[in-house]
Amino acid sequence: MAGSTRLGLLAKSFNLLSVSQPPLSHGIVRQYATAVPFTRPSIAAVPLSTKVNSVKQRLNQPQLPQVQPVRSTSFFNKLPADQLWKGVTSVSNAGKKRGRGKGVGKKMAKNLNRGQMIGVGRENIVWPGLNAPILRGKELIQQQKLPKDTEREAKLIKMRDTMGVFRPLRLDPLERGWSGNKMPGRSIGPPNPIGEDNFDGFDTKVLELKTVTHMSGIFGRKRRMSMFVVTGNGNGLGGFALAKANTMPDTMRKAKNRAGQKLIYVERYNDHTVFHDFFSQFGYTKLFVKKKPEGYGLVCHRAIRTICEVIGIKDIYVKVEGSTNIQNLTKAFFLGLINQKTHQALSEAKQLHLVEFRKENLDFPRVVASPQSGKVRNLEEIPKDEELDFGLYTMDGKVELQRKKYPPGYQSLPSYNTFLKKYLKRRNHDKVMVDMRVEYGELRSFYTEKYPECKPGPKRNAEEAM
């Protein structure tokens, strides 16, 4: 009986106006048939007037109003457009501390309202009270259509294109730093004068610029700018300093003024290079500095190149091993420049003549310095364990690390050995020919004086030989 009661209630709850109802599946019908006998109600059992009356009664019943909560305010109409745009494009304080959003300020958003007036559209119509005053003196302004502006769209597009692209400041190529417009490598001018003393001819260049933070218990994380600079007059005077401040102008001023107060005079050979090769080290940074002839240039790290330009060194080679920290590089290089000895000091320390050999002079010896006392040690007076190699003596016994050079692959071929055997007879011919042209002005052999017609070169007639 429980099943028949449930089915009866189910039948009463459905609207029986529908004729084509989906039949139950056979399995379900079979299940109900076994439980309770079920007879489908016939359409003819309910009169049509009864159905219509029941529908009218339902329509005439009072309907309860449906209440739907609606917000009259939201995030988008509470804040102005500037704050909404900033919320989309900006970075939170926590994100800035982690280094996010570094390129946010480089691109500007396009303001599509720029260049347009309220009410003035493509049709160019004057609307009193919208884009024009209602009264102009005692005259009442009427709505009117102005001539169409054919260049309006082109002007707007041109104005928007100039807004959306970020164009960095254009610098002269000589004023740029190591990499584009960044500060390292750029000049910030001479130090400020101290009283009546002016730094005429000085120039200060930035070697390092970074943001440093300090965590305090009261103020939290405090940010400051740190700048490492070098200054000099290009004539042997130079100095470096590190300064920190809250703003960029204060950091630049403090750094270059502090560098101007710590000047060091550097000895130079012929005002273009160092006196001798030397080795210098600060921390884990090792420098192997080599003296070079005029015209060689500055072949070194970019920070050392900047220091040499400021001091006045024009030709040098520097090999860096270990750490390339900018501050360690600068300190190691200045230590080496301070500790280098002049030729006279080297001669006095060894009590020997200092002799120079140059390739351009065919290694002809030239005495550069001699002891002032005139006393020079001989071989018997020099100890056997004393270092006489000038390179090892000035380099403090250090040798720079050199990459191993492997022979080319063709040297392992049998044909290369055959070439060496054939080349053995004429291996020095090119040098001998150059020496002959320098000494005699022509190519000749030991038979040339006895047989002038046997001069090397193209064949000549007997008359030409005479």
Image (spheres, rainbow, N blue to C red):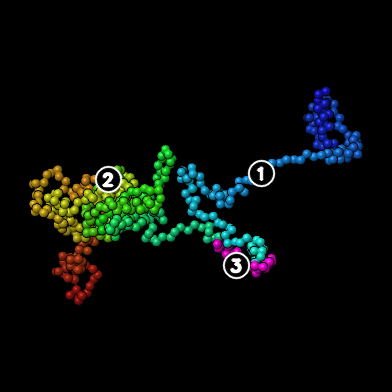
Q: Quadrant of the N terminus?
A: top right
Q: Residues within 10 Å of mark 1 (few under 14, many from 20)?
A: few
Choose top left, top right, bottom left or bottom right for residue 140: bottom right
Residue at mark 3: 151
Q: Amino acid at mark 3?
A: Glu
Instruction: Please tell me whether mark 3 sits on a helix, a strand or a loop.
Output: loop
What's the residue type where badge 1 is placed?
Arg
Residue 53 at x, y = what percent?
Answer: 88, 39
- Give me the C-alpha separation between circle 3 and circle 1: 44 Å
Look at 59% across and 48% down and name the residue there: 79
Q: Is residue 155 magenta?
A: yes
Earlier residue among tags 1 and 2: 1
Count every numbered label the image shows and give the total. 3
Residue 56, x across and y down, in percent:
86, 40
> Depth check: 101 or 318 in front?
101
Q: Secondary structure at mark 1?
A: loop
- Name the residue nearer the viewer: 367 or 196: 196
Q: Residue furthest front?
A: 138
The dot on residue 265 is: none
Numbered disc 2: secondary structure: strand
Nearer the observer, disc 1 or disc 2? 1
- State which tag comes first along the sequence, 3 or 2: 3
View extreme (top): residue: 1
> What distance separates the C-alpha of mark 1 from that of mark 2?
72 Å
Residue range highlighted in magenta: 137-159
Q: Which residue is mark 2?
A: 281
Residue with the mark numbered 1: 71
Q: Is residue 241 left or right of residue 26?
A: left
